[in-house]
Image (cartoon, rainbow, N blue to C red):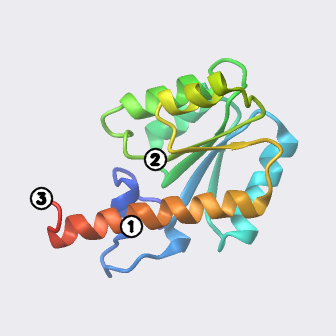
Amino acid sequence: MLCWRGQSFLEQCMDASSSCDRSAITTLVVEDSPNQAAQLRMVLEVEVEQFTVLMAKNGCAALAVLRETLPTMVITDVVMPEMDGYQLCDTIKKGRALHDIPVIMMTSLVSWDDITRNLECGATHFLCKPYGSVALISRINYIYAIWVAAWMRRLCGCCR
């Protein structure tokens, strides 16, 4: 199984065999533009070691997905109908079962106020649109490495 209901990102990284299997990474992509959603799916499934990708067209649809499964990370657009990326990220970070999920915000809004708003809502990172697949992959790998290291520290009791 590629995504385990009820397990956090860190728990997904450590399955019964105690190995970090990158094929177990499930990413929820929240994007209202069909073209950009398809591009993100392609990058994640083909260029990033075949991650499993779940799709939602806005924040409300993403919350419905999050009620059913806990993805490894969320990559979300900011400007969307019904519920924008800021509201979605804020909801994820305030949710007891969801707050550990890393959130990458993708936006064409690049003023200092917009950057600050990305960070204030709890985003793990943000990328400016248009983005390159190398930049996206770099951010994913960075976040993945940090979270795996945090999990390993918790397992060995290094940081009590």
In front: mark 3 or mark 2? 3
Amino acid carrying mark 1 in the image: Val
Q: Are marks 2 and 1 in contact (CB under 8 Å)?
A: no
Q: How far from the left and from the top, in percent, is residue 71?
A: 49, 51
> Is 154 rendered above or below residue 91?
below
Q: How far from the left and from the top, in percent, is residue 131?
A: 79, 50
Numbered circle sitting on residue 127: none
> Is 78 rendered above or below residue 148?
above
Q: Which residue is mark 2?
A: 69
Q: How far from the left and from the top, in percent, is residue 136?
A: 69, 57
Q: Is residue 128 left or right of residue 153?
A: right
Most extreme residue toward the front is 112
Q: Residues within 10 Å of mark 1 (few under 14, many from 20)?
A: some
Question: Can residue 128 be seen in this snapshot?
Answer: yes
Q: CA distance from mark 1 to mark 3?
A: 17 Å
**Circle 2: element type:** loop
Please report the residue visible at 17 percent of the width from the left and 68 percent of the height from the top. Answer: 158
Amino acid carrying mark 3 in the image: Arg
Most extreme residue toward the top is 82
Q: Nearer the viewer, residue 129 or 54?
A: 129
Q: Is residue 158 left or right of residue 119?
A: left
Q: Which residue is mark 1?
A: 148
In front: mark 2 or mark 1? 1
Q: Mark 3 or 2 closer to N-term? A: 2
**Circle 3: element type:** loop
Q: Mark 2 or 1 closer to N-term? A: 2
Q: CA distance from mark 2 to mark 1?
A: 20 Å
Amino acid carrying mark 2 in the image: Thr
Q: Which residue is mark 3?
A: 160
Q: Nearer the viewer, residue 66 or 47?
A: 47
